[in-house]
Image (cartoon, helix red, strand yellow):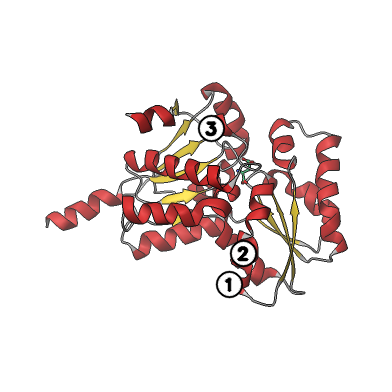
């Protein structure tokens, strides 16, 4: 009986989600839609944004530090909602969690995107738009190979696209021109499917689609990430069986007011409960 009770308690624990800032809210958005009964705690590392130009070593350190902060807050499962952090740090994070929280699953955004792209392409040529950290990790090359060996991946590193999208409301010509320039190598390579390999790119999907043409399939991984999370919860008996809508709250390492204001645009829902967190102080305690 006590073991059943314990499992029952674990079911009502939150899912921990993290990203370099507000971008991962495009992934949380899908999680809230597809898993409405679950509670979520989201951590945006806004003080250290952007992750896209950081080294693999830094991203591993940040990911492990944030995962520990979410574990302290009772996370029953972790979602790395950041492409750069997933691409550079998922294996190291999994190794860390195998010791720190045996049995806890971490879901990243790379594999669900690869799965969708492998299914969508008809000519076998897939494009990737991502940050420098994501492209140089080679994670999408490996991920795509795992789903279908014969596929060709054409990757384009877009160092300034995420910062421009983030700063660019309302969007102007500069955003359009930047997005268009990054699409050119993909058009030249005649890809028929393009992975939006960064949290910010779904916000400029119409511009990218217009540059690439209507027949190119754009792949955003959010809904597939939600479906993978659902599968893990069902497998492990961890789905929250309580009816009604779950709660969600936010932690950020930078300015709270800025996170709330910018975050609403990415989540397309209100952000109410936002708190500041000092990760270094937590680690030292
Ligand atoms: N969240 C990051 C990603 O998906 C984009 C922004 C950044 O560079 O931190 O790669």
- Taking depth in this image into account, of 77 and 153 the one nearest to the observer is 153
- The answer to which of marks 2 and 3 sits earlier in the sequence is 2
**Residue 241 can be seen, yes or no:** no
Are dots 1 and 2 in contact, CB under 8 Å? Answer: yes
Q: Position of residue 142 (x, y in %)?
A: 61, 66
Name of the residue lying farthest toward the left: 1
Q: CA distance from mark 2 to mark 3?
A: 31 Å
Packing grade of label 1 (10 A; few <14, some 14-19, many >=20) is: few
Q: Which residue is mark 3?
A: 270
Which one is in front in this view, the residue at disc 1 or the one at disc 2? 1
Query: Residue 23, labelled with which disc?
Result: none
The residue at the point 54 percent across, 42 percent down is: 58
Q: Would you identify the image quadrant in which residue 160 lies?
A: top right
Query: Residue 114, labelled with which disc?
Result: 2
The residue at the point 36 percent across, 63 percent down is: 234
- The answer to which of marks 1 and 2 sits earlier in the sequence is 2
- Taking depth in this image into account, of 77 and 216 the one nearest to the observer is 77
Q: Position of residue 155 (x, y in %)?
A: 74, 58
In this view, 234 is above or below 146? above
Q: Which residue is mark 1?
A: 146
Callout 2: helix, strand or loop? helix
Q: Quadrant of ligand 1?
A: top right
**Rendered-image quadrant of the C terminus:** top left
Q: CA distance from mark 3 to mark 1?
A: 38 Å
- The answer to which of marks 3 and 1 sits earlier in the sequence is 1
Name of the residue lying farthest toward the bottom: 150
């Amino acid at each position: 009986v006590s073991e059943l009770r314990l499992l029952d308690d674990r079911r009502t624990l939150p899912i921990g989600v993290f990203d370099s800032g507000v971008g991962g809210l495009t992934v949380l958005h899908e999680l809230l839609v597809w898993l409405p009964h679950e509670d979520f705690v989201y951590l945006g590392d806004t003080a250290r944004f952007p992750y896209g130009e950081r080294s693999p070593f830094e991203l591993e350190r940040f990911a492990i530090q944030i995962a520990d902060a979410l574990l302290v807050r009772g996370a029953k499962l972790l979602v790395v909602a950041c492409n750069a952090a997933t691409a550079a740090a998922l294996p190291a994070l999994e190794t860390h969690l195998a010791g720190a929280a045996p049995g806890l699953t971490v879901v990243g955004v790379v594999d669900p995107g690869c799965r969708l792209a492998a299914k969508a392409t008809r000519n076998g040529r897939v494009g990737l738009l991502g940050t420098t950290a994501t492209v140089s990790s080679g994670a999408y090359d490996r991920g795509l190979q795992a789903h279908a060996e014969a596929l060709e991946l054409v990757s384009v590193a877009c160092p300034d696209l995420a910062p421009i999208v983030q700063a660019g409301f309302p969007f102007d010509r500069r955003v359009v021109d930047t997005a268009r320039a990054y699409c050119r190598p993909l058009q030249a390579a005649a890809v028929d499917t393009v992975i939006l390999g960064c949290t910010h790119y779904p916000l400029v999907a119409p511009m990218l689609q217009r540059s690439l043409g209507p027949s190119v399939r754009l792949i955003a991984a959010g809904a597939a990430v939600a479906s993978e999370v659902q599968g893990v919860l069902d497998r492990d008996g961890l789905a929250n069986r309580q009816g009604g809508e779950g709660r969600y709250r936010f932690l950020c390492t930078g300015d709270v007011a800025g996170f709330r204001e910018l975050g609403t645009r990415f989540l397309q829902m209100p952000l109410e409960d936002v708190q500041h967190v000092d990760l270094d102080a937590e680690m030292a305690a």
